[in-house]
Amino acid sequence: MELPAAKGSGLDNFSVAYFTASCDDPATNLKYAAALQLDYPILSDPGKKVAEAYGVVHEKRPVPERWTFYIGQNGNILHIDKKVNAASHGADVAKTLKNLGID
């Protein structure tokens, strides 16, 4: 699986923090991020507690769903994208941020 790099996606036009989360251990994620030269962090959730809380891991899906959560500064979820296209996701995120009125 290749994660989309944020470089060139237009995300740098927004004042937001972005990252990806994985159920792999931190060492695996560090190697993966370095190999792909990602310009954003991968958070580790090997116990799957956060993934379960967000509903991306459940009885029917032990491997996490690839969803994007847009979370406002107040901690509220503004939008959930459940149809992530890895090839265009950086640009898709920028478009969604614009549609949500986020600067």
Image (cartoon, grey):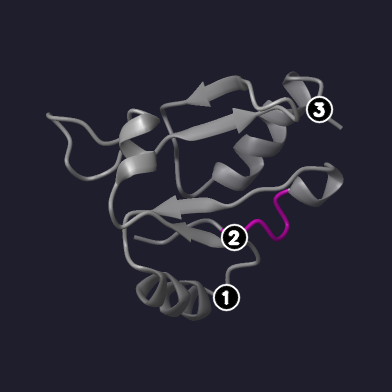
Question: Main SS type for the magenta part?
Answer: loop
Label at residue 37: 1
User: Which amino acid is tagged 3?
Assistant: Ile
What residue is shown with label 2? 5
Residue 100, given in percent of the width and then of the height, sits at 73, 20
Label 1 with label 3: CB-CB less than 8 Å: no
User: Which amino acid is tagged 1?
Assistant: Gln
Residue 32 magenta-highlighted: no
Residue 80, given in percent of the width and then of the height, sits at 51, 24
The range drawn in magenta is: 5-9
What residue is shown with label 3? 102
Q: Is residue 96 above or below residue 7?
A: above
Circle 2 packing at 10 Å, graded few (<14), some (14-19), many (20+), is: some
Q: CA distance from mark 2 to mark 3?
A: 20 Å
Q: CA distance from mark 1 to mark 2?
A: 8 Å
In which quadrant is the N terminus drawn?
bottom left
| Dot placed on the residue nearer the N-terminal end, 1 or 3 | 1
Q: Secondary structure at mark 1?
A: loop
Image check: 63 left or right of 75?
left
Q: Residue furthest left?
A: 60
Closest to the observer, 62 or 68: 62
Residue located 17% across and 41% down the image: 62
Q: Quadrant of residue 55?
A: top left
User: Which amino acid is tagged 2?
Assistant: Ala
| Dot placed on the residue nearer the N-terminal end, 2 or 3 | 2
Q: Secondary structure at mark 2?
A: loop
Q: Secondary structure at mark 3?
A: loop
Circle 3 packing at 10 Å, graded few (<14), some (14-19), many (20+), is: few
Label 1 with label 2: CB-CB less than 8 Å: yes
